[in-house]
Image (cartoon, grey):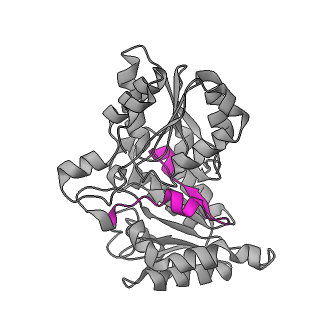
Amino acid sequence: MVPVRDALKQAIDEEMERDEKVFILGEEVAQYDGAYKVTRGLWKKYGDKRVVDTPITEIGFAGIAVGAAFAGLRPICEFMTFNFAMQAIDHIINSAAKTFYMSAGAVPVPIVFRGPNGAAAGVAAQHSQCFAAWYSSVPGLKVLMPYSSEDAKGLLKAAIRDPDPVVFLEDEIVYGVPFPMSDEAMSPDFVLPIGKAKVERAGDHITIVCAGKATHTALDAANELAGKGIECEVINLRSIRPLDFQTIAQSIAKTHHLITLEQGWPQSGVGAEICARVMESPSFFELDAPVWRVTGADVPMPYTRSLETLALPQRGDVVAAVAAVLGNRISEASVSQ
C-alpha cells in the first residue's frame, strides 16, 4: 500500500533522475519538503537548482516556469492550492496554452502545473473550487485528475514527459490515503496513457462517470447498490481533456443508463460536457432514461462543517440518483441542485 503523496513523489523523483531538464519550483517545495510533503527529500538529493523555493507570488513563479519551458526545460510548477493559480491564470492560459499554436509549432511548452484542487475540509469558499471544467475548456491544455496512487504516479510521469502544458489536479483529502500498487506500477518505466479512462468497477445496470475523489464516492455508492441487486459500472476518467468518450459510449451501450458525478459546480461542468457529447452522438439512442448529473451545490463552499457536507455530493445522493434514473423518476433525483 502506497499513499498518494508518496506515489507523486516517486513520479517526480524518477523523472528528475531520468531527465536533467526536469525541475520543480513552488512555495516551500525545497527545505520544508513541500506543504503536503510530496517533495520530501528531493531538495537534499537534487539541490537548489532543481528544487526551487519561491516567494509567495504565483504570478511570478508561474511566469518563470513558463519561460523555462519556452527555453527547453521541463518545469513542474507546484501551486499550494489551485485556487491560488488564479493569480497566475494569464501565464497558464495566454502563454502556456497558446504559444505552441501561435508560434506555428516552433515553441513547445512542456510544463506541468500541479497541486491540490477542489474541496479540502474546513477551508471555505476561497480554497475549495474545482478547476477541472475551467481548464478543460481551453485548447492547448491537457487536464488530468488522478484518483488512486497508481493514477497519481502513472499520470504524473506521463504529464512530465508530455510536450504540451498539463494541468494536474490532485485532491488534498487523499494525499495520505494508501492504495495498492502493482509491481508494474512500482517500476520506473510505469507510465499511464493520457486520454484513457479506467473502468474501476464493471456493471450492467447503470454507468457512473467520475474523476478524482468523486471516484471514491461512486465506488461507495456502487457497493451499497450491489447489495440491492443493482450493478453499477464506475468509470474513472483520469483525463478530463482529452476526454475518453469512447469508453463512456461503450459503457452506455451496455447499461443504457448514465449518471455523471463531480464535486464541482453544475453549470458548465464536466458532467454538462459529457451530457452534451452524449446528446450529439449515437449514444443518445442507447439511453433508456435521461442522463442525470450529481454535482456539488451551486453555491460558494460554506465554512461550517455541516453545510460543507451538504454542498458536496455524498454516497446517498448517488444512490438516490441511481434509483430515480433506473426507475425513470428523474424529478426525484434532484439531490444536489
Quadrant placement of the C terminus: top left
196 w.r.t. 69: above or below:
above
Can residue 12 be seen in this snapshot? yes
Name the side, left or right, on which 297 lies relative to 290: left
Residue beneath the point at 54% across and 43% down: 185
Residue beneath the point at 33% across and 47% down: 312
Quadrant placement of the N terminus: top left
* Most foreground residue, 130 or 114: 130
* Most foreground residue, 287 or 124: 287
In this picture, which residue range is highlighted in magenta?
Answer: 127-152
Residue 203 x %, y %: 53, 22
253 w.r.t. 180: above or below:
above
Label count reads 0
Snapshot quadrant of residue 23? bottom right
Residue 11 x %, y %: 52, 57
Residue beneath the point at 62% across and 29% down: 252
